[in-house]
Image (spheres, grey):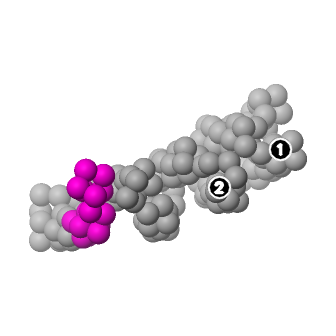
């Protein structure tokens, strides 16, 4: 409805109604959490990508999901995909994307493999859209994360991450 029917308000109402029906505790055939996590990210992505959508509304939906499920790193990656792909030099605020990467790097329970991929992705984005100073900042954040992870009992994995960060970043 967003794109084909050019009726974003109707699509938003449909999403709200679908969520109410599928997440109803009386509906024994569905798991409300699974429905919520399957439906809302897709709808939020529609808000981002559709010419009739509202990116702010998409961001808000993702922020609600991240507030509820902060450790679901696939949600962080989906939002990063949307933000970086829809970023246009000069017309958008790079601070929104940087803030997203910054907050994602502070997620509790972030595993070394996820962190490495996240920092690498952030560094690549800064390489393309930022400057040398912002790139150095990402490297410093990655090293800081590795040090903090090492203190948190991750031991060898965190040390490996720090060594890899030195060469990869």
User: Is 138 positioned to the left or the right of 72 in the image?
Assistant: right
Residue denoted by label 2: 91
Gap in angstroms between the C-alphas marked 2 and 1? 17 Å
Q: Is residue 44 shown left or right of residue 142? A: left
Q: Please tell me which residue is depicted at 37% across the width and 58% down the height of the picture.
A: 52
Q: Position of residue 166 (x, y in %)?
A: 83, 33
Q: Is residue 99 magenta?
A: no
Query: Would residue 130 be found to the left or right of residue 54 on screen?
Result: right
Q: Residue at x 51, y 56 (%)?
A: 71
Residue lying at the far top of the rendered structure: 167
In screen coordinates, is 42 left or right of 24? right
Q: State the image coordinates of residue 131 (x, y, percent, origin top left).
A: 83, 44
Q: On residue 107, which mark appears?
A: none
Bounds of the magenta span?
Answer: 1-16
From the viewer's side, name the closer residue of 65 and 50: 50
Which residue carries the number 1 mark? 131
The image shows a total of numbered marks equal to: 2
Say which quadrant the C terminus sits in: top right
Q: Is residue 13 magenta?
A: yes
Give the image quarter of residue 10: bottom left
Q: Residue 119: x and y, percent?
A: 69, 42
List x then y, in percent, for residue 94: 69, 55
Secondary element type, mark 1: loop
Q: Nearer the viewer, mark 2 or mark 1?
A: 2
Q: In the picture, which quadrant includes the N terminus?
A: bottom left
For residue 48, say whether it is visible: yes
């Amino acid at each position: 409805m967003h794109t084909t029917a050019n009726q974003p308000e109707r699509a938003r109402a449909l999403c709200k109604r679908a969520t109410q029906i599928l997440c109803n505790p009386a509906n024994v055939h569905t798991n409300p959490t699974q429905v919520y996590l399957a439906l809302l990210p897709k709808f939020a992505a529609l808000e981002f990508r559709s010419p009739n959508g509202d990116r702010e509304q998409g961001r808000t939906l993702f922020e609600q999901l991240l507030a509820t499920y902060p450790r679901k790193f696939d949600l962080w990656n989906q939002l990063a995909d949307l933000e970086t792909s829809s970023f246009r030099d000069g017309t958008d605020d790079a601070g929104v994307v940087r803030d997203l990467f910054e907050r994602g790097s502070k997620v509790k329970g972030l595993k070394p493999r996820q962190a490495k991929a996240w920092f690498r992705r952030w560094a690549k984005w800064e390489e393309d859209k930022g400057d040398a100073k912002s790139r150095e900042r990402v490297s410093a954040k990655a090293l800081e994360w590795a040090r903090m992870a090492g203190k948190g009992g991750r031991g060898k994995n965190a040390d490996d991450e720090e060594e890899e960060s030195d060469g990869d970043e």
